[in-house]
Amino acid sequence: MDPKTIKGEVGSLAAHRKGSGPASWAESSWHEADVKKYPASISDFTLTHENISKFCLQGHTPSLPFLGKEDNVIAIGSCFAAELRHFLNDVGLSSDSFWIPSGLNNTFSLLDFFSWVTTGHQTSKGFGYSKDDSGTLGDWEPKFERSSYRKALENANCFVFTLGLAEVWEDTLTSKVFWRGVPANIFDEKRHHFRLSTVEENVTNIVAITEFIRKLNPKAPIIFTLSPVPLKATFSEVPCISADCVSKSTLRLALHQVISQKLTDVYYWPSFEIVKWVGCHLPFPVYGTDDSVVRHVSRYVVTKILYSFVATYYGENLAKEIFDNHLMSLPSREGLAGEPPLIYTGQIVTA
């Protein structure tokens, strides 16, 4: 059939056509009370706190800030939690820097750790390994007495978790999941199985983590975030980019289901969405701009997310006071064409 003889649209690459454009969804025939629309203009995709609040935070955050200058925030995990922990220390806000095992990025490892702190016993779900000073891998052993960890958790005013990994290695004989990868010196291809953890498993683990925290600290708010930093590698059969999408989607859906349970004082902070959805509309890359590491989020973007976090949970007056002073102290240069407005030539925070 000759396409020229077909009446109506077969397909269109036109930027605008009848029935498209900003107003096309909410036609008069559709119910639209309380609808939340996707941003309609490129100008909506900026990193101002106003736009982040309007398009990213609604429904996720408390109605009023609940943290003060002296409140103790425990931030656990990589990416945003680590950035937040170091930032709060640097600007003089109280943030507990007590030592926890590194690499607690999957929910099985986090559950194991909080089970041990709370009860003295790890769960039957995880294997923990760590490196000694020589780099040798061995069974994980706590660096401090359990009572030190308990005291830190009991005295916290807020917890912030960043989740990063849904892909795991499992021991098929015990059904235990490794905290990280499988140490090379014990790997057995007949015994150790790589898999994607399920949404249901992660929901169960996240809820159990909150329950262990509540046994020690009934009132401190708990904030969960999802890391926007892509997977470094995957053992799955698909490219790492696809595997990262599935892994992050699994955790995001798990967090959505947990938040939907309306647990008291449990929140979600959408740093993932700010980077992935707002970031893709910005006129500069959001990854790799400062150190050429393509998995690292731009320092400029990180500062904007941190500002919105402080404005949301501490109050906008305190955020303005802190950032006016702090950003001026950071070494930076003006961004060139195709770069963020500012390139931070040093670290935002000290390691």
Image (tube, rainbow, N blue to C red):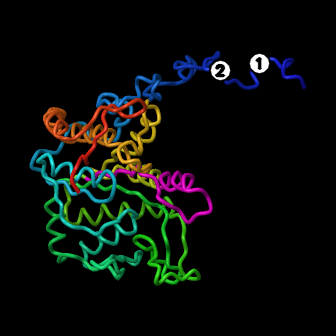
Quadrant (top left/top right/bottom left/bottom right) for the C terminus: bottom left
Out of 348 and 147, give the one closest to the viewer. Answer: 348
Q: Secondary structure at mark 2?
A: loop
Q: Identify the disc placed on residue 290.
A: none
In the image, is residue 246 part of the stretch drawn in magenta?
Answer: yes
Q: Residue at x 45, y 53 (%)?
A: 230
Residue identifier under label 2: 14
Can residue 1 be seen by looking at this rendering?
A: yes
Query: Which numbered mark, 1 or 2, is in the foreground of this view?
Result: 2
Residue at horizontal 21 percent and vertical 67 percent from the top: 99
Q: Residue at x 27, y 77 (%)?
A: 133
- Residue 192 location in percent, x, y? 53, 78
Name the side, left or right, on which 307 lies relative to 4.
left
Region rendered in magenta: 222-250
Badge 1 or badge 2: first in the primary sequence:
1
Q: Is 80 left or right of 256, judged from the image as shown?
A: left
Q: Which residue is mark 1?
A: 8
On-image quarter of the N terminus = top right
Residue type at mark 2 is Ala
User: Relative to the observer, which residue lies in front, 102 or 167?
Assistant: 102
Quarter of the figure with residue 164: bottom left
